[in-house]
Image: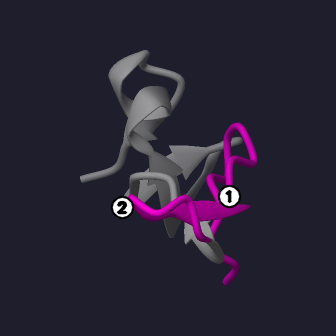
Amino acid sequence: MSYKCVVCSKGPRAGKSISHSKRATNRLFRPNLQKLRIKFKGVVQKSYVCTRCLRSNKVEKAL
């Protein structure tokens, strides 16, 4: 299972970490994903969902 949201496909993005002396090194910006049991498209599955999709009720939690 890849590290991305099943609802909005949000995943890691590449960027730069910039120090005080302005030296830039590569890094990853990772989204806040939670691994949950959800009901998605009528099927109960365990998958990653970002907190923005959870907060806006785009997904239904399965019990």
- Front-most of 39 and 49? 49
Task: Indicate whether 63 appears above or below 27.
Answer: above
- Residue 36, image x, y percentages: 36, 61
Residue projecting furthest to the top: 56
Q: Amino acid at mark 2?
A: Leu
Q: Are marks 1 and 2 in contact (CB under 8 Å)?
A: no
Left or right of 24, for residue 52: left
Q: Main secondary structure of the magenta part?
A: loop
Q: Is residue 55 magenta?
A: no
- What stretch of residues is rendered in magenta? 1-23
**Which quadrant is home to the N terminus?**
bottom right
The reply, left or right, for residue 62 in relation to residue 3 is left
Instruction: Say the numbered circle drawn on residue 36.
Output: 2
Q: Is residue 16 above or below residue 40?
A: below
Identity of the residue drawn at 70% across and 79% down: 2
Dot 1: within a 10 Å radius of its alpha carbon, few (fewer than 14), some, or many (20 or more) residues? some
Residue 15 appears in which quarter of the rendering? bottom right
Which disc number belongs to residue 11?
1
Q: Position of residue 48 (x, y in %)?
A: 51, 62
Q: Earlier in the sequence, mark 1 or mark 2?
A: 1
**Residue located 54% across and 64% down the image:** 17
Report the amino acid beneath label 1. Gly
Q: Position of residue 58 (x, y in %)?
A: 53, 23
Residue at x 68%, y 47% (from the top left corner):
10
